Amino acid sequence: MRWMLASALAMAFAPLPAAAQTVAEHNELPAPARAAIDKAFADFRDRTPVPGMVYAVVRDGRIVHLGAWGVQEIGGSAVTAQTHFRIASMSKAFTALAILSLRDKGKLSLDDLAEKHIPQMRRWTYPTADAPRIRIRDLLQHVAGFVTDDPWGDRQQVMSEADFTRTIAAGVPWSRVGQSQHEYSNFGYALLGRIVTNVSGMPYQQYIRRTILEPLGMRETGYEVGNVGKDRLAAGYRWENDQWVLEPFMKDGAFGAMGGINTTAEDYAKWVAFLLSAWPARDDPDAGPVKRATVREMAQGLNFVRIAPRPGAAADDKCVHAIAYGMGMRVSPDCDLGLTLFHGGGYPGYGSFVVLAPETGTAVFGFANRTYQAPSLPVWQSLWALARAGVIAPRPVPLNPLLGEMQDIARAAYRAGGLGPLEGRLAMNFLLDRSAENWAAEFARIKGLVGECSTAEPLAPTGSLSTAFRWNCEKGQLDGQILLSPTNPPAIQALRFNPRPAP
């Protein structure tokens, strides 16, 4: 059966290009890195055929690599960077940032009860007498207690605002008590769209256009797919009964806040570049349509964390993802990339995925026009390929010169065999936690293991008030940590040593 399906798919794709088309002005990566990225997406296409696909690497505010493959419509023109795709739930990040921008303007609080801004919710009956009423932040982070509603939510895209009002007024069945567990909800983000409308005084689509899309120059991004000419739109398909079946073109409606955006690779790259520009925190002028600090707030998860292996991980891959939902984006640290923000988009006729690695200043995304076939694995693989090739890396934490000064004093104390050189630089807890006499004995013990330490490696700060260190010694190495106190001036609250004698 598998070979028959593969044969049928091959026949369906016979007239399509054999390889990704790349655009010369977007090929700024080293050739091996480009090849690894193109291979990752080609492998995805071989495993999961799609009529068309486009993908891009964004770095330093622009596309540095772009690939396009296949057709916008069966028998039609080729996919390009200007082809429009629906990105489904990747729209949620726009809705989340719109809510945060209204908070910044003093129009609402994330701790406001949602019913303050949606009066129809005031009559809801909650699942238990002690269930908390829904806050705006509960909707943002999918902890309101609603049931997971894929794929039901996708088919509500066309719901009118009047019908949505009636749906809200009718109340909801509950999956669980709110604030007790994460459960993904398209309905919840549709409610956020209604809040944007009611608080801003204009339809949420218009608010997002004025607040985000127009300032970023995203002229090819919008909600009503009917406004996109057929010659520029990737038609959405599903594979059914051994043939491509065209999905219906759903017009924009009340549920667009959860997944209604259509965009192009070139336009979406502007959005991704804007999000990436929020890192790191700095003193430069804050000229974006929404503050950098507000964008970074989207990465704050609510701590209903799940542990999962990295996508496509080999059995011996020791790195796992601890995933929380932030605001419109999932969040996880990655061993190669540092902080990551990511989200997929599944929709009748479309699949999309994006990963931002803001500590490296890099992101990768991909769009395809087949139902729920998001190119998530090649997006991740592309970033890992860049990291492992040394093309990208998390930015180092800036070194506070005070940490270097404290290391010099700590090394002097180690040489002296006592805390004398540290006098006046110790926090009030230091000698309460361990006596000066015990420290002298500890220095002697460590010297017996590794001897005197003549040089030090560059410090590896973990923040402005903490650092790891490594000293090179006569008989091995001495690793440790310096932790400063939350006082002015900072003082040493902890000094930790881990001797590593040579074999």
Image (spheres, rainbow, N blue to C red):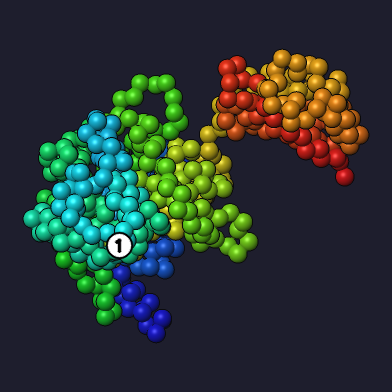
User: Is residue 55 visible to us here?
Assistant: no
In this rendering, position of residue 242 left or right of residue 1: left
Q: Which of 13 and 59 is in front in this view?
A: 59
Rendering coords of residue 279 (x, y %): 43, 33
Compared with 13, 209 (above or below) is: above
Q: Quadrant of residue 249?
A: bottom left
Which of the 4 image quarters holds residue 116? Answer: top left
Left or right for 149, reference 314:
left
Residue that sits furthest to the left in the current view: 162
Compared to 426, does 70 lie above or below?
below
How far across and down, in percent of the image, does residue 333 sit?
51, 47
For the N terminus, the image quarter is bottom left
Position of residue 31 relative to residue 79, above or below, is: above
Secondary element at image label 1: loop
* Residue depicted at x 41% and y 67%: 46
Expressed as whole percent of the image width and height from the top left, the position of residue 461 reads 62, 30
**In the current view of this chain or complex, which residue is farthest to the right?**
448
Q: Which residue lies furthest to the front in this view?
A: 129
Residue 241 percent coordinates (x, y): 26, 80
Q: Label 1 crowding class (10 Å Cα cut-off): few <14, some 14-19, many 20+?
A: some
| Residue shown at 40% from the left, 56% from the top | 180
- Pick the front one: 113 or 401: 113
Q: Can residue 279 be seen from the camera position used here?
A: yes
What residue is at 31 percent from the left and 41 percent from the top?
A: 111
Q: Residue at x 38, y 68 (%)?
A: 48
Residue under label 1: 127
- The one nearer the camera, 221 or 293, is 293
* Residue 218 vertical position relative to residue 412 in the rendered view, above or below: below
Q: Which amino acid does label 1 sit on?
A: Pro
